[in-house]
Amino acid sequence: MEIRHLTDTYAVSPQIDPADMAALKAAGFATVINNRPDAEIPPELQTDATRAAAEAAGLTYIVNPVIGGAITLENVDRQRDAIASSSGPVLAYCASGNRSSIVWALSQAGRLSTDDLIATPARWGYNLEPFRNSIDDLARKG
């Protein structure tokens, strides 16, 4: 498991395993957001298995499947709400961490500058430049 901190309270990761939940709790995370649709992964990594492991470890588990190239405002709102309601740091995961970075940046539009929302994930190799206009549009809408 490779944790990539975007902020002090939000990190992304490629696909995690249910066995990782105790280590995530020990690392101080309070909430895990699953941004990966079940159709992409084998049954042992799907929502039911990871939710059970997360809850057994004392973590809040949020399901917000993000389809690459088809991120919705519902995805953005759900991510923002999950981050805001978490009692501590959040780890979001998908296949590579890219979608979790994109939906984070969109959910934080207007709270941080667009330049920062693009530059922060870039430190981990995530290119959010194609989302600049979407981030700006969401920031203007408030």
Image (cartoon, rainbow, N blue to C red):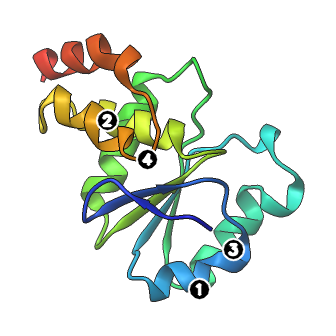
The answer to whether residue 131 is left or right of residue 75 is left
Element at label 2: helix
Element at label 4: loop
The dot on residue 124 is 4
Quadrant assignment for the C terminus: top left
Three-letter amino acid code at disc 1?
Answer: Ala
Which residue is tagged 1? Answer: 22
Three-letter amino acid code at disc 2?
Answer: Ala
Residue for point 43% across, 28% down: 127
Dot 4 crowding, Cα within 10 Å, few <14, some 14–19, many 20+: some
The answer to whether residue 104 is left or right of residue 51 is left
**Residue 50 in the image: above or below residue 101:** below
**Alpha carbons under labels 4 and 1: distance apart:** 24 Å
Element at label 1: helix
**Alpha carbons under labels 4 and 3: distance apart:** 29 Å
Dot 3 crowding, Cα within 10 Å, few <14, some 14–19, many 20+: some
Viewer-side label of 4, 3: 4
Q: Indicate which disc, 3 or 1, sits on the residue closer to the N terminus.
A: 1
**Residue 1 in the image: above or below residue 74:** below
The answer to whether residue 116 is left or right of residue 49 is left
**Alpha carbons under labels 3 and 1: distance apart:** 12 Å
Three-letter amino acid code at disc 3?
Answer: Ala
Residue for point 61% across, 25% down: 68
Q: Indicate which disc, 4 or 1, sits on the residue closer to the N terminus.
A: 1
Which residue is tagged 2? Answer: 105
Which residue is tagged 3? Answer: 52
The answer to whether residue 130 is left or right of residue 83 is right
Q: Indicate which disc, 2 or 4, sits on the residue closer to the N terminus.
A: 2
**Residue 102 in the image: above or below residue 123:** above
